[in-house]
């Protein structure tokens, strides 16, 4: 049976050529050339001054929070709906994540929920551009500034997205990106931290290399730090992908447009939103089922997989997963965050791999239509 992957890259001869060159020549005194070229090209694409290539987006968030001095007693607000990597670095540092509700249309952090989650202990907020969507960054930024709260943008899933014309990754003190193999732009594994602040950049550069200052040839560590670097091989692939970014994002938007066309008349199903002020790069085409269908995400995923269609569940509320369910952050979260708890049980990420063609989407959508139409509507 044909399998339709939920995620996957688009690799061309350009990536192969750059990676081969890095494997052949990216050693000794030239070892840093591809990382430097990748960082410069990437920073330019997201309208930032500085970029630091890293092994993951998670390490970028960890580095940013550490550079801010976040630690025990501090609170960092995060959206309830996101991957655990957004919250985990807060916990690594002994600080407390605070889970705030999402907007029902964008699925991203609600500006109102952010406002209500602020306490005297709040030091930062991590906003997440979920599945390529973007929150109300202007309102969130104003609230944060008025309360002396640092804004970190988790743009792991949103390379190519824009809010009011500004690229994802250009907001706040710092932004982070993921180049995991599932992402639109990939290095297999990897990430990037970007910022405009020179002092913050300098602090991150020390922390990312075991507390060793850039240019230190004596290997004289100033403090304890981390090992957060990217190899020349990864950077070579990332540079090639950055040079093809418009093509990659264009394909993601094509895939989503095909789903829109195929599912236009299907009652009870909602796809990703694209509000007027947002250009959505649609990392993952996602459907939300109306509860009246009597089918949740688990049932839909099982039905799709029988047809050879790979899929993923919409992220679970962070306060509901075992890693956080028994922590103080989870107490009362379901009552505080009704939108997140209403959306998550009924969301499924559809196949969005860059290898998919128009005919593939037609087949996937056809099966989805049949499954939904065969569902038994709830009488509630």
Image (spheres, rainbow, N blue to C red):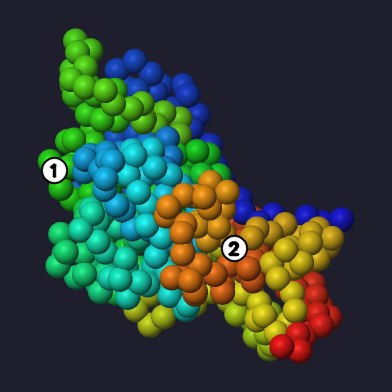
Q: Which mark is residue 155?
A: none
Tell me which residue sits at (46%, 59%) in the image. Answer: 331
Above or below residue 25? Residue 93 is below
Residue found at the very far top of the displayed protein = 218
Residue 298: percent from left, percent from top: 72, 63
Q: Confirm whether residue 243 shows in the render.
A: no
Q: Secondary structure at mark 1?
A: helix
Assess disc 2: are there few (<14), some (14-19) or many (≥20) residues with their C-alpha within 10 Å of its C-alpha: many
What residue did someone put label 1 on? 198
State which quarter of the image contains the C terminus.
bottom right
| Lower position in the chain sequence, tag 1 or tag 2 | 1
| Residue at 41% from the left image edge and 28% from the top image edge | 231
Task: Give x and y (percent) for residue 36.
Answer: 29, 35
Q: Are marks 1 and 2 in contact (CB under 8 Å)?
A: no
| Placement of the N terminus among the 4 image quadrants | bottom right
Question: Alpha carbon of mark 1 to alpha carbon of mark 2: how far?
Answer: 37 Å
Q: Is 221 located above or below residue 267 in the figure?
A: above
**Quadrant of the image occupied by residue 279:** bottom left
Task: Establish if 317 lies above or below 111.
Answer: above
- The residue at the point 42 percent across, 35 percent down is 55
Name the image quarter holding residue 94: top left
Q: Where does residue 358 sit, x and y in percent of width and height? A: 68, 69
Q: Which residue is mark 2?
A: 314
């Amino acid at each position: 049976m044909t399998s339709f992957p939920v995620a996957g890259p688009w690799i061309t001869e350009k990536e192969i050529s750059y990676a081969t060159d890095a494997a052949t020549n990216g050693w000794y005194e030239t070892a840093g050339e591809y990382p430097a070229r990748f960082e410069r090209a990437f920073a330019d694409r997201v309208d930032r001054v500085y970029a630091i290539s890293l092994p993951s987006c998670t390490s970028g968030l960890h580095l940013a929070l550490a550079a801010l001095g976040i630690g025990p007693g501090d609170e960092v607000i995060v959206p309830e709906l996101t991957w655990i990597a957004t919250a985990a670095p807060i916990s690594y540092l002994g600080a407390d994540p605070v889970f705030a509700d999402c907007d029902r249309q964008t699925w991203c952090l609600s500006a109102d929920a952010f406002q209500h989650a602020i306490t005297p202990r709040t030091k930062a907020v991590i906003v997440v551009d979920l599945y390529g969507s973007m929150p109300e960054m202007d309102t969130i930024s104003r609230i944060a500034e008025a309360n002396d709260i640092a804004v970190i943008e988790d743009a792991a899933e949103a390379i190519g997205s824009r809010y009011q014309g500004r690229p994802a990754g250009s907001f706040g003190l710092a932004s982070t990106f993921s180049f995991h193999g599932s992402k639109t732009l990939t290095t297999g594994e990897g990430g990037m931290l970007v910022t405009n602040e020179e002092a913050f950049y300098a602090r991150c550069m020390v922390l990312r290399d075991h507390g060793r200052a850039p240019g230190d040839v004596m290997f004289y560590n100033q403090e304890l730090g981390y090992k957060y670097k990217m190899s020349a091989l990864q950077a070579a692939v990332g540079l090639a992908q950055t040079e093809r970014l418009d093509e990659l994002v264009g394909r993601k938007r094509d895939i989503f447009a095909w789903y829109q066309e195929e599912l236009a008349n299907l009652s009870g199903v909602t796809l990703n939103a694209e509000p007027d002020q947002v250009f959505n790069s649609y990392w993952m085409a996602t459907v939300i089922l109306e509860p009246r269908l009597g089918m949740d995400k688990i049932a839909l995923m099982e039905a799709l997989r029988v047809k050879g269609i790979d899929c993923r569940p919409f992220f679970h509320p962070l306060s509901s997963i075992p890693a956080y369910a028994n922590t103080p952050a989870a107490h009362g979260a379901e009552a505080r965050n009704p939108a997140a708890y209403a959306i998550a049980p009924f969301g499924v990420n559809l196949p969005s791999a860059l290898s998919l063609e128009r005919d593939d989407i037609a087949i996937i959508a056809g099966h989805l239509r049949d499954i939904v139409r065969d569902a038994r509507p709830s009488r509630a």
